[in-house]
Amino acid sequence: MKHVSVTEAHQQQQDGYTYVDVRSTREFEAGHPPGAVNVPLLEHDETGQMAQNPDFIRVMKATFEPEARLLIGCQAGGRSMKAAQMLEAFGFTDVINVKGGWGGAQSFSGATIDPGWLACDLPVETDTPVERTYAALVEKADQAS
């Protein structure tokens, strides 16, 4: 498993990698790296609780080729690490986990382990073209089935 910092991820986006934000749609809509697509690993269910997204792999396979160059990011690094491992297990070959994610990773004492996208003052996008939203990607996956 490869890992990069958020600043390295930002540079790799310039080099053709796609940032896949695996946070929930609510988190994604509040702000994300420019150009990111949203495929949540966990999503809010009808009760508001976070639950495993059963369509995660299906939507990823319908959206990206196995050799696609992917940066996987979340809020702090935990979900993205799990998502990257899953993607590798399902045949994706160029998957990189983004350490620190959107908000940064902290130790139990509150010290910053890996600064996040926001703390590094990297560009932020809140207006997302519809084709990069999870709803559009699910629709595309449904049509491919």
Image (cartoon, grey):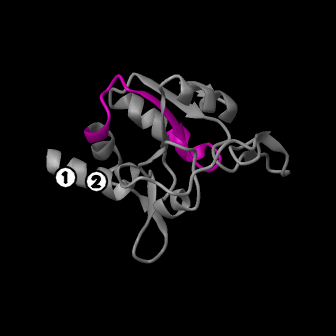
Was residue 78 drawn as part of the magenta stretch in this picture? yes
Q: Residue 22 — which label?
A: none
Q: Amino acid at mark 2?
A: Val
Residue drawn at the location 27% of the way across and 44% of the way down: 58
Q: Picture quarter containing residue 13?
A: top right
Count of numbered marks:
2
* Circle 2 residues within 10 Å: few <14, some 14–19, many ≥20: some
The percent position of residue 33, horizontal first and vertical second, equals 58, 45
The percent position of residue 89, horizontal first and vertical second, equals 37, 30
Which residue is denoted by mark 1 in the rendering? 142
Residue drawn at the location 52% of the way across and 56% of the way down: 28
Was residue 42 drawn as part of the magenta stretch in this picture? no
Whether residue 144 sits left or right of residue 94 in the image: it is left
Q: Is residue 46 above or below residue 127?
A: below
Q: Amino acid at mark 1?
A: Asp
Whether residue 113 sits left or right of residue 6 in the image: it is right
Residue drawn at the location 49% of the way across and 70% of the way down: 49
* Circle 1 residues within 10 Å: few <14, some 14–19, many ≥20: few
| Magenta-colored span | 62-82
Front-lying residue, 42 or 9: 9
Whether residue 140 sits left or right of residue 22 in the image: it is left
Give SS at disc 2. Answer: helix
The percent position of residue 105, horizontal first and vertical second, equals 72, 45
Residue drawn at the location 44% of the way across and 52% of the way down: 40
CA distance separating discs 2 and 1 = 6 Å
Report if the CB atoms under discs 2 and 1 are less than 8 Å apart: yes
Give SS at disc 1. Answer: helix
Whether residue 132 sits left or right of residue 142 in the image: it is right
Q: Is residue 13 above or below residue 107?
A: above
Q: Is residue 45 above or below residue 13?
A: below
The percent position of residue 7, horizontal first and vertical second, equals 69, 32
Which residue is denoted by mark 2 in the rendering? 138
